[in-house]
Amino acid sequence: MKKTIQILLVEDDPGDVILTKKMFKNIQATHQLNVVGDGVEAMAYLRCEPPYVKSPRPDLVLLDLNMPKKNGCEVLQEMRSDETLRPIPVVVLTTSDHAMDVNNAYRLGANSYITKPSGLEAFSQAIESLETFWFKTVQLPTK
């Protein structure tokens, strides 16, 4: 039996959440996409704090940078400074293509950086590439 890949999507834009969920429905890998709407919720989820006490540990985090309460860079920095969260791969999935944001995300420990493409076809291709690399090519860390 194949292992279910646990994905945490940290995204505050409801439209992007719907679109990402739709794209992930086409993924062939067995996965569960869990969603939180801001950085504070993301850290509560990752640390299994209320209301996420029984949340599954993600195998991969898809992280938006521009969010209320706590932005993606702050989440990334906290994850990389926490010994138990550090091994979880983080893919920054955001609208920003500014070199400063890209460089900062990698400096803070992002495993990859994807600028959200505009258009359904391009977004679908980005998710397919993400699936191929993270679910079929690399070996994810064990819990």
Image: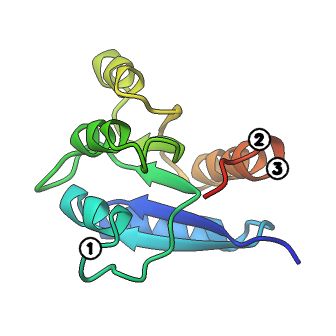
Compute the Cα span from label 1 to label 2. 29 Å
Compute the Cα span from label 3 to label 2. 6 Å
Instruction: Choose top left, top right, bottom left or bottom right for residue 53.
Output: bottom left
Q: What residue does disc 3 label? A: 136
10 Å crowding of disc 3: few (<14), some (14-19), many (20+): few
| Viewer-side residue, 1 vs 97 | 1
Residue 97 image position (x, y, % from top left): 38, 27
How many marks can you see? 3
Question: Looking at the image, do the residues carrying marks 1 and 2 touch, with CB atoms under 8 Å apart?
Answer: no
Question: Looking at the image, do the residues carrying marks 3 and 2 touch, with CB atoms under 8 Å apart?
Answer: no
Residue 44 image position (x, y, % from top left): 26, 67
Q: Element type at marker 1?
A: loop
10 Å crowding of disc 2: few (<14), some (14-19), many (20+): few
Compute the Cα span from label 1 to label 3. 31 Å
Residue 66 image position (x, y, % from top left): 23, 45
Residue type, numbered disc 3: Lys
User: Which corner quadrant holds the N terminus?
Assistant: bottom right
| Viewer-side residue, 32 vs 97 | 32
Residue 139 image position (x, y, % from top left): 76, 44
Q: Earlier in the sequence, mark 1 or mark 2?
A: 1
| Viewer-side residue, 3 vs 93 | 3
Q: What residue does disc 2 label? A: 138
Q: Earlier in the sequence, mark 1 or mark 3?
A: 1
Residue type, numbered disc 1: Glu
Q: What residue does disc 1 label? A: 49
Q: From where the camera sits, is residue 131 visible?
A: yes
Question: Looking at the image, do the residues carrying marks 1 and 3 touch, with CB atoms under 8 Å apart?
Answer: no
Q: Which residue is drawn at 48% across and 45% down?
A: 118
Q: Residue at x 26, y 83 (%)?
A: 51
Q: From where the camera sits, is residue 116 visible?
A: no
